[in-house]
Image (cartoon, rainbow, N blue to C red):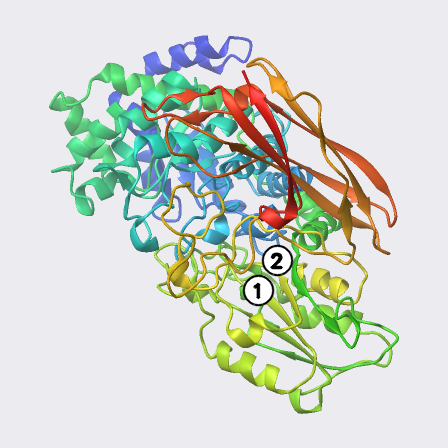
Amino acid sequence: MDRAKYLDPAASIEERVEDLLGRMELPEKVGQLMQLDGRNDMRGAIERLHVGSLLHLNGPDADAAIDLALGTRLGIPLLLADDGIHGHSFWAGATIFPTQLAMACSWDLSLLEEAARVTAREMRATGVRWTFSPVLCLARDLRWGRVGETFGEDPFLVGELASAMVRGYQGKGLGDPDAVLATAKHYAGYSETVGGRDASEAELSRRKLLSYFLPPFERVAREGCMAIMTGYQSIDGLPSTVNRWLLTEVLRETWGFKGVLVTDYNNVGRLVTDQRVCEDYAQAAALAIGCGNDLMMATPEFFEGCLEALDRALVSEAELDARVRRVLFLKFRLGLFEDQGRSSAARIAEVVACDAHRAVNLRAARESLVLLKNEEVEGAPLLPLEIARPRKIAVLGPNADDPLAQLGDWSLGSGQMTSRSGDAHPRSSIVTVLDGVRALLPEGWSIVGEKEADLVLLVIGDRLGLVGEEKSTATLEPQYGQAELARRAAALGVPLIVVLVASKPLVLPADALGAPAIIECFNPGMQGGRALAEALFGAINPGGKLTVSLPRHAGQQPVFYNQVRGQHGTRYADLTQEPAFAFGFGLGYSRFEYGRPAIEAERLGRGDTLRVRVLVRNAGRMDGVEVVQLYLEDEVTSATWAKRELAAFERVELRAGESREVSLELPVSEMWFVDSEARRVVESGYFRALIGSSSRDQDLQALRFYVA
């Protein structure tokens, strides 16, 4: 065979793609659009089906697949992918961070970027080039089983945090030897389902999609994210896999997205077997290609189906070629033809769970903690605990010493898969709450049974059986007798600290909600127990803020803060509509005082920028962190709109007694809403800028201005 141009690194990517495409036979082209589970007949997938991508292989298994692909007729390299959701999930001993929902509570973009960078390094060492993260779904119905995978309920914040993770994963560019391809998922509206049930019909209009669910994806697409994954759900009768408006008109023609679009697991097959909008796999393959999908995940029937669709003229070879070009272009950009990305035992030993990565993980666990309540006991706030006063502490609750509950979903042991490296993360790599308290227990203190205790630490939450895909819950109360346990703990008559280790917001039983101190951890990762113990004993000052509202009752769903105004009445007849704890809320051991905010100009044109300044002072005795939040209210809109929306924020570290002027900016061009014609517009009129420490009215100060 002549020296192929596609093998010449000096040629342009466009030249290499066209040269390779011209040499490919139809089965090879079809195979490049397939992504299969590599644990199932890896050789057959590569040699018979010519697959372009494989899932769930790492280490020696990844290397074997790479070698098999290079031995095929054209030697087209594989793109190996895995679910690195909050760490290298399925490599035993890898650094497992707090879940997205937990880390989001830090409001720390640099932290999210560094956590993703750590994950990328560890994945690359084991031969994986692509992660299916971050998740950009909005957590608006908390019954949904995948809330813990999200960043919370606010579209703007989701877009900012997700973009930080994309930067971390993709590093200096797709050719970066320590970078992986990021994936924004699930496109779009997957979380907005009927009754909170997973993958049901999403009750969404195009206006609602454009208003809330699409902006985070637009943000990461413009950030440079090179892969987007479709969701399982359908909208207005169209499964996301065959929604051409979403996949082509919006994503590619409007936003200019140049990356690849991958379906979620067996989405093409579900068109035939579950959603039943296609008669056979030929029709499903033709629709999936015609609507804009590039890689069909976990549908082996796509191979014969696509060939049949070509034979029946349901899809043209030109359409097929357009999709293959995108896949090949990405592979060349990733440098796979020069460096296939084999695993490295030396690199694994050097980077996986190294001290530097564990330090980032501990930082993430510390910054993710949210102090929800800290009332006075005997004349002083209960937390931090007074070390000089020895206590007999009882550590109770099912999640006090449960490694899997602490790691959460998408980790070894959570049920998605096992690995050659093991079926669970080493117990020695995980610091549970009980481990952390034992390690930091002050001199003279002791851990005792509940009858002897003069202080109780109650660790409650949920378990993996109630978390994840296909595991939505009808209720939000802690299960497995935890309400009775909370009642028993409260009845002891000693100070009670409630610690929440859970995948998502729970409705707390009255005895837990009535405790003088409550700390929300969500799933805090491998170092969560140490971080929690440090907070209890005052070694750190918790500064996290909620990115999702915590309800009082499951029947309040949805309880997110930025709901559309105009409701008749302000409460249920039998219950308030206010959450137990609001979006943006979080206490600390310091008290932050806000001066009177000032606005640079009270009249702005469409090309101007709103600038708000406020003096913030740490009036406490501990160094601490405050998240200064700016919300926007458009007083009158030509179509109904949210009462207020998060528009900007800044995370500020202040020493005890220190003051700092914080300046927040918002271009007028970003003060848009979506009108009744589904157009994004900025309308003239009065607006209010609200600045403060949470989304609650009592925590905000308002400034009025006019957009001309």
Report x, y in % for residue 266: 29, 43
Query: Can see residue 584?
Result: no
The crowd level at tag 2 (other Cα within 10 Å; few <14, some 14-19, many 20+) is many
Q: Looking at the figure, which quarter contains the C terminus? A: top right
For marks 2 and 1, the one nearer the N-term is: 1
Of residues 230 and 543, the one nearer the viewer is: 543
* Residue 359 visible, this orientation: yes
Q: Is residue 94 left or right of residue 591?
A: left
In the rendered image of this protein, does residue 3 appear above or below residue 271? above
Which mark is drawn over residue 166?
none
Q: As displayed, is residue 80 above or below residue 536? A: above
Q: Which mark is residue 524?
A: 2
Q: Give the x, y percent position of residue 140.
A: 43, 48
In what element is the residue under mark 1? strand
Please name the amino acid that badge 1 sits on.
Val
Q: Which residue is mark 1?
A: 501
Residue 498 rendering spot, x and y as whole percentages? 62, 71
Residue type at tag 2:
Pro
Q: Residue at x 39, y 24 (%)?
A: 251
In the image, residue 14 sits, relative to residue 298, either above or below, namely above
